[in-house]
Amino acid sequence: MAGVTGDRTGDSRRDPQDPRQVPAPFAAALASLRERRLRGEVHLAEIPGPTRVAPFSVALEGEVTAPDGEEVATGRFVVLHDPEGQETWQGTFRVVTLVRATLEPELAADPLLADVAWTWVTESLSAAGTDVLATGGTVTRVLSQSFGALAATPDAVDLEIRASWTPTDTDLGVHLAVWADLMATAGGLPPLPDGVASLPSRPSRRGQPRPGSRPHTVGP
């Protein structure tokens, strides 16, 4: 993918674009995000990162489209970095993800839906072969039923997965790919066949142009 700038928060006198003011681990993490190739159905745009949770952050919003161009999943990927570490993180980095998708209405009554959705998270991390700490999150499902003038609208189940974890190194491109694969899974896309290379991700149509959003410019 193209670049990501990242943000330095909490001190207006610092320039987040000045590499001399960006910690080496955060710069390495941004470089790994910039170099990661994702499947072609994933479209990304950089958005402003959180300003109060950590001194350094970078945030991306994403969407996944089916072959016919229909949007099947959306999400958000945030990297937080505190050089001094945070006790609850058990490290100096934290990856925070969000995935949303609309599922078939018959899945609403499945009591195992949330458990299955959470296994998508754990199995994606395991398949990536990356070590993480303090993994946690929530799975929420909402059944939408229409009435009156909207009675003909089909029922729908909106699924939301929020997951966060602590990486043990600065190769965060792997974690970006985990999130992208999670969006694709929630959107019902099949895994890429073995031997099929991923393509550079394209800018999100949802995110262009949007106040506060930036094209892919990862890294100082």
Image (cartoon, grey):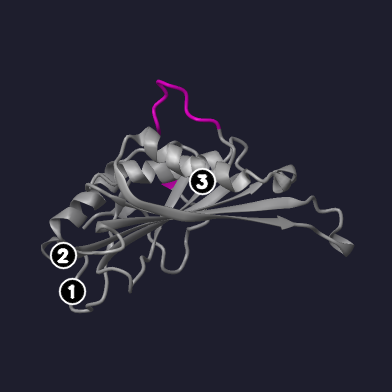
- The answer to whether residue 80 is above or below residue 64 is below
Query: Mark 1–mark 2 contact, CB under 8 Å?
Result: yes
Quarter containing the C terminus: bottom left
- The answer to whether residue 41 is above or below residue 24 is above
What's drawn in magenta, residue-wise?
A: 190-202
Query: Mark 2–mark 3 contact, CB under 8 Å?
Result: no
Mark 3 = which residue? Answer: 118
Q: Which of the two residues, 214 or 162, is positioned nearer the viewer here?
A: 162
**Residue 154 belongs to the span the image colors magenta:** no
Left or right: 165, with 187 as reference point: left
* Dot 3 crowding, Cα within 10 Å, few <14, some 14–19, many 20+: some
Report which quarter residue 57 is drawn in: bottom left
Q: Which of the two residues, 192 or 70, is positioned nearer the viewer here?
A: 192
Amino acid type, callout 3: Trp
Q: Where is residue 216 in the image (x, y as percent from the top left)?
A: 35, 53
Label 1: element kind: loop
Q: Residue 18 carries which label?
A: 2
Residue at (24, 50) in percent of width and height: 29
Which of labels 3 and 1 is toward the front? Answer: 3
Left or right: 214, with 56 as reference point: right
Q: Where is residue 69 in the image (x, y as percent from the top left)?
A: 60, 41
Label 3: element kind: helix
* Dot 2 crowding, Cα within 10 Å, few <14, some 14–19, many 20+: few
Amino acid type, callout 1: Arg
The answer to whether residue 41 shows anywhere in this view is yes
Mark 1 = which residue? Answer: 14
**CA–CA distance between discs 3 and 1?**
39 Å
